[in-house]
Image (cartoon, rainbow, N blue to C red):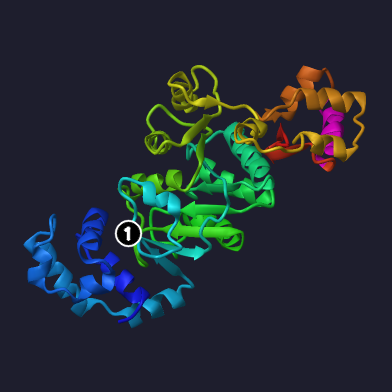
Amino acid sequence: MKGEEYNFWLCSIPGIGIRKLLQLETELGTPERIYRSDEERLEKIKGISARDAHNIVTSRQTFCPEQMKEELERLDMRCTTWFSPEYPVLCRHLYDPPKRLFYRGELPQEQLCIAVVGARDCSVYGREIAKRFASALAASGVGIISGMARGIDGWAHQGALEGGGRTYAVLGNSAEICYPAEHARLYQSILKRGGILSEYPPGTRAAPGFFPMRNRIISALSKGVLVVEARKRSGSLITAEQALDQGKDVFVIPGRIGDTLSEGCNNLIREGAVLVTTPEDILNYYGIVCEDLTENLKKNKLILERREKMVYANLSLEPKHLTVLAEEVHMNSAEVMGCILSLLKGGLIKEIGNHHYIRNAI
């Protein structure tokens, strides 16, 4: 073997975690020197048991660098290890950092990345808020990191793409597997404008225990974590707790009292998380100067008629049915529909199905 192949070998040995790797590195230096050490020498290293030493020695016979290279090339995948210079610096500060990261596309390169997480069964309001924040942050040069799960994760990635920025997904399975399957198009879009990462080798299917583990990487790669919607007990809160343990900033969208999707968010605020209501709140927190993100409406130069203004004023990010709108603005359904068609054409609102409408996130 040669060069980087020794790194791949050492980081692929089962049962040899990062702490033991660091101890081996301290005592013996490079992965190549570890590879060439006999079992007796390895057993003398503090923290390395006889079983560990035996596993290290026998792994030399089963590790095939050519096969590994062929597999990665076939999947258009790369791998960076703890010993590689391109290994993300922020992951090195983890208590239990991944020994290696497999990735398709690119690793995060932005100076500032924000993780956006939240409920899988999010509300329409949560969906639009996730898209709005991710889009605005991405448009200002902030990398968006999430887990590509259903709900808030997926909408955050989508928002970042719509904002013209870059986004990165950390998976709870190997990087060549799109999970959930319905995110196939999103997966391909992320590859073109960011990257897909995983600590799990090719062929690893998703498992419940993998998702809490991947959450630590999501928070590690980010300067701060934004929680959009979260129940009292959820994976999003695990990510927030890990972020706090790592010394990261935690931002929270406040929710309505009594709403189960808001319980986790409101508890985080009570415990000292930063309450935010606009993307500018996060950008200003980091000293990023940006245009007023509401200028998009002004640039539209759409002069609303009085009736259209009334309809628009009665819409929000919560879906509202045509008949309800008609009652609120004291017009018949045909008149409201005429206003809605004009607002849709101007890009100010959107239909989410079955004559329900919301304001378009700015």
With 355 as the anchor, is 166 left or right in this view? left
Q: Nearer the viewer, residue 267 or 307?
A: 267
Q: Main secondary structure of the magenta part?
A: helix
Q: Which residue is mark 1?
A: 99
With 355 as the anchor, is 22 left or right in this view? left
**Quarter assignment of residue 200:** bottom left
Instruction: Write down the region rendered in magenta.
Output: 332-344
User: In the rendered view, would you say 119 is above or below 216?
Assistant: above
User: Could you tell me if residue 342 is visible in this image?
Assistant: no
* Residue 186 x %, y %: 57, 56
**Quarter assignment of residue 126:** top right
User: In the rendered view, would you say 355 is above or below 204?
Assistant: above
Circle 1: element type? loop
In the rendered image, the quadrant that contains the N terminus is bottom left
User: In the rendered view, would you say 245 is above or below 144?
Assistant: above
What residue appears at the point 34 percent right and 47 percent down from the top-left corner?
Answer: 213
* Residue 293 x %, y %: 74, 36
